[in-house]
Amino acid sequence: MGWIKEIVGDRVLDPLFARVGILESDTTSIAIVQLDLCMIRATDTRILRQAVESRYGFPGSNVMVACSHNHAGPA
């Protein structure tokens, strides 16, 4: 993806988190996944959605993945 470089960290300065919120109605459930990252690739989002669906039976199409755009975290 153009300017994105693979960078491997060798230490942890601050903890990074992944948070999940699930909203439910009588007929539908959606999940919002918030990651302390600068960005996430579409391929990684697709893998995450597939893993959630496979492991938990939660529809991957109902999972929104968002990043906090944290410049101190990895891409």
Image (cartoon, helix red, strand yellow):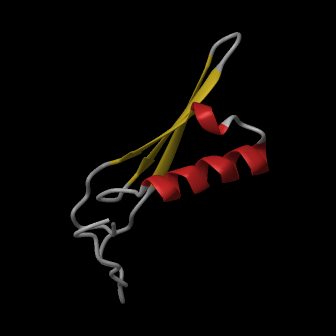
Horizontal side of 30 relative to 56 (left or right) equals left
Image coordinates for residue 61, horizontal then vertical, percent? 60, 34
Q: Is residue 34 above or below residue 75?
A: above
Image coordinates for residue 35, horizontal then vertical, percent? 41, 52
Question: Residue at position x 76%, y 44% from top?
Answer: 56
Residue sticking out furthest to the top: 26
Residue sticking out furthest to the bottom: 10
Image coordinates for residue 7, horizontal then vertical, percent? 33, 81
- Pick the front one: 15 or 52: 52
Horizontal side of 59 relative to 72 (left or right) equals right
Question: Residue at position x 32%, y 65% from top?
Answer: 1
Q: Is residue 41 above or below residue 49?
A: below
Question: Residue at position x 38%, y 67% from top?
Answer: 15
> Which quarter of the rendering shows the C terminus?
bottom left
- Pick the front one: 1 or 27: 1
Image coordinates for residue 53, horizontal then vertical, percent? 72, 44
Q: How many marks?
A: 0
Q: Is residue 27 above or below residue 18?
A: above
Question: Residue at position x 36%, y 89% from top?
Answer: 10
Horizontal side of 40 relative to 30 (left or right) equals left
Res 23 quadrant in image: top right
Horizontal side of 12 relative to 57 (left or right) equals left
- Pick the front one: 54 or 42: 42
